[in-house]
Image: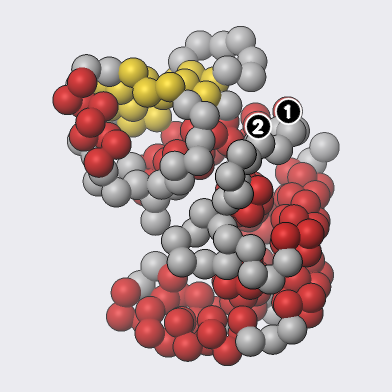
């Protein structure tokens, strides 16, 4: 399966999960319901004037206003807009940009919906998706783990293979789990099934750190 086909499948999967959950379900995104998440997804691809505020603090107030306006639309319409994909003029409509920017985004948000309920069960991870997530960990760790000085090694449990270093530093911490669980952890999510190994002080510092965007 090509990366482009894979990200299309993940878009469809996330849209299905949003519809099945309904507009008022909780998510792992702090303070967001599924309606808020759907609005975020639509804005991110179709409102570059507002999307910048997701990462640029001075623009956050404008982003919040646009998000509130967007979230007031009928929920099924919001999900349909997301499912259809970005407008033709959006950079996200370029296949290479779509694949580079959206595979991790959609995989994490799908689990944000699925794992927000008590007794959550992780989705059945597609082996190709897992390989892509695993390959993105070293690059994304530069941003997601920017607040840490320790080294991080990861070990995946869904296949047999050697551990991989995704961040240099000392002392070194080892995180063991599936690629999606490790990716969720690095995005600051707590509903994960991982093992974190290292000396007591390093593990405590990792757990107390602000991870993610």
The kind of secondary structure element at disc 1 is helix
Residues 203 and 1: in front is: 203
Tell me residue 128's x, y (percent): 73, 32
Which residue is drawn at the image coordinates 57% and 26% (left, top)? 178
Looking at the image, residue 213 lies above or below residue 85: above
Residue 199 lies, with reference to residue 121, above or below; the image says above
Relative image position of residue 187 (x, y in whole percent): 44, 47
Q: Quadrant of the C terminus?
A: bottom left
Q: Residues within 10 Å of mark 1 (few under 14, many from 20)?
A: few
For disc 2, the marked residue is 130
x then y, percent, for residue 170: 19, 24
Pointer 2 with pointer 1, Cβ within 8 A: yes
What residue is shown at x 42% (from left), y 87% (from top)?
Answer: 62
Quarter of the view holding residue 181: top right
Q: Nearer the viewer, residue 187 or 189?
A: 189
At a point 64% along the width and 15% down the height, the residue shown is 159
């Amino acid at each position: 399966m090509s990366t482009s086909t894979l990200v299309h499948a993940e878009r469809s999967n996330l849209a299905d999960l949003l519809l099945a959950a309904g507009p008022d379900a909780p998510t792992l995104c702090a303070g967001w319901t599924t309606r808020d998440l759907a609005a975020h997804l639509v804005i991110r691809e179709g409102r570059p004037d507002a999307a910048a505020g997701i990462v640029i603090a001075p623009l956050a107030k404008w982003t919040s206003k646009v998000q509130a306006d967007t979230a007031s639309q009928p929920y099924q319409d919001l999900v349909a807009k997301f499912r259809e994909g970005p407008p033709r003029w959006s950079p996200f409509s370029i296949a290479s940009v779509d694949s580079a920017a959206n595979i991790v985004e959609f995989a994490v948000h799908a689990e944000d919906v699925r794992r927000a309920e008590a007794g959550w069960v992780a989705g059945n991870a597609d082996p190709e998706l897992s390989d892509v997530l695993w390959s993105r960990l070293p690059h994304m760790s530069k941003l997601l783990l920017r607040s840490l000085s320790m080294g991080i090694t990861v070990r995946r449990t869904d296949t047999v293979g050697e551990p991989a270093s995704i961040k240099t530093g000392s002392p070194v911490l080892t995180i063991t789990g599936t690629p999606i669980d490790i990716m969720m952890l690095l995005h600051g999510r707590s509903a994960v099934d991982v093992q974190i190994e290292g000396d007591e002080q390093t593990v405590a510092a990792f757990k107390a750190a602000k991870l993610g965007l």
